[in-house]
Amino acid sequence: MITLSLCMIVRDEEDVLGRCLASAQDLVDEIIVVDTGSVDSTKKIGKAFGARVLDFPWIDDFAAARNFSFAAATGDFCLWLDADDVLLEPDREKLRRLKAELTLDVDAVMLPYNTGFDQQGNVTFSYYRERIVKRHFRWQGVVHEVIAVSGNVIYGDCAVTHQKLHPSDPDRNLRIFEGLLQKGVKLEPRQQFYYGRELYYHNRFAEALAVFRQFLAEDDGWLENKIDACRHCALCWDALEQPHQALLALLSSFAYDLPRAEICCDIGWRFFQQQNWPAAIYWYRRALGCRRDDRRGGFVLPDAYGYIPCIQLCVCYDRLGEVRRAWRFNRLAARYKPDSPQVAYNEQYFAGLEQQTAAPN
């Protein structure tokens, strides 16, 4: 069986680190915890789980810190987690089986990363990450770091679940990017894309648009980032009260690849807000026709590939007076989310209409 090193970088994570390590401790052969300046009991918790705890001075470079953790590993493969990640029980068993079956001819394993959830705990935001890699791989990028995996890359279904308990420094990433720019560093395409997102998060919409436009104008940006950049351009235009430009930004995503359900739902919502029911129906039906492919690596909103189009089509057809068709789409929505409060509300609504229709005059 291959050997697996869990590699982490942490700072002041006493409230979540134990939870993370408890979920992974028995699945790995060693734990490397690189601390970048904790003043709480983070290091003590790591040692209690048998981790090798190493110090690394923080230099505003996530890749450097992660590479330090990889350099300390002795396993055949490195598994990386953040302190507020956790392996849930079904995924623990999947990882146990994966480790037992993994062979040295594999170079990297891509696994789902679930980072968004609704009130019922259903996953609403997910994407694949390079989660288990041969020890020789190295991280790139001071912020939103990534490993450019190559060779024999396989995909698994063992998800890592992100369960954040406290917010991180909201200005940190933007501060790092702007520090690089002040030094005259030219951002490579991936960094440029994430810099645009940080500007958007800080409500600097016109600046974000300029960065996204520059990113989209270059040839070497990643396809999935370009599509997401179109979505963020639309959000920026909306914030600047330019809805027509926002719609054009969404439509421009079709120049890069087949339509994504997320984009079709965004367009459908615009016509829905205008009460243009036929146009909204068109785009929500297009969303239902889009094939979900998480292995493309982009950000995925699972609800866009079933639940959202169905629940919205239910409303649209009801507004057009096509009650039976509306009811059918509500029941289709229930197949995707049986515990949806909106589905339950609609069922009561339609049942009431049916009773009214059946009532004698």
Image (cartoon, rainbow, N blue to C red):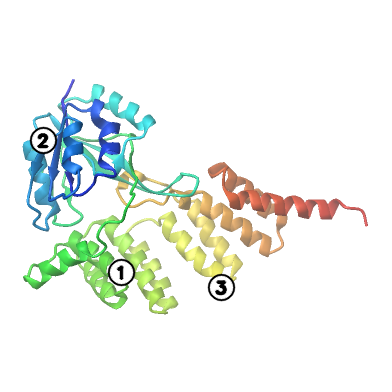
Q: Few, some or many C-alpha atoms within 10 Å of disc 3 (few <14, some 14-19, many ≥20)?
A: few
Which callout, 2 or 3, points at the residue further toward the start of the chain?
2
State the CA–CA distance, disc 1 to disc 2. Answer: 35 Å
Name the residue: 29% across, 55% down. Answer: 224
Name the residue: 9% across, 72% down. Answer: 182
Which of 354 and 345 lies nearest the eye of the viewer? 345
Which callout, 1 or 2, points at the residue further toward the start of the chain?
2
Question: Is residue 87 shown left or right of residue 340?
Answer: left
The answer to whether marks 2 and 3 mark residues whose Cβ atoms lie closer than 8 Å is: no
- The residue positioned farthest toward the bottom in the image shown: 241
From the image, tell me which residue sits under label 1. 200
Secondary structure state at the residue bearing disc 2: loop
Question: Is residue 295 shown left or right of residue 217?
Answer: right
Marks counted in the figure total: 3
**Quarter holding the C terminus?**
bottom right
Amino acid, disc 2: Arg
Residue 261 place in picture, x, y as percent:
44, 55
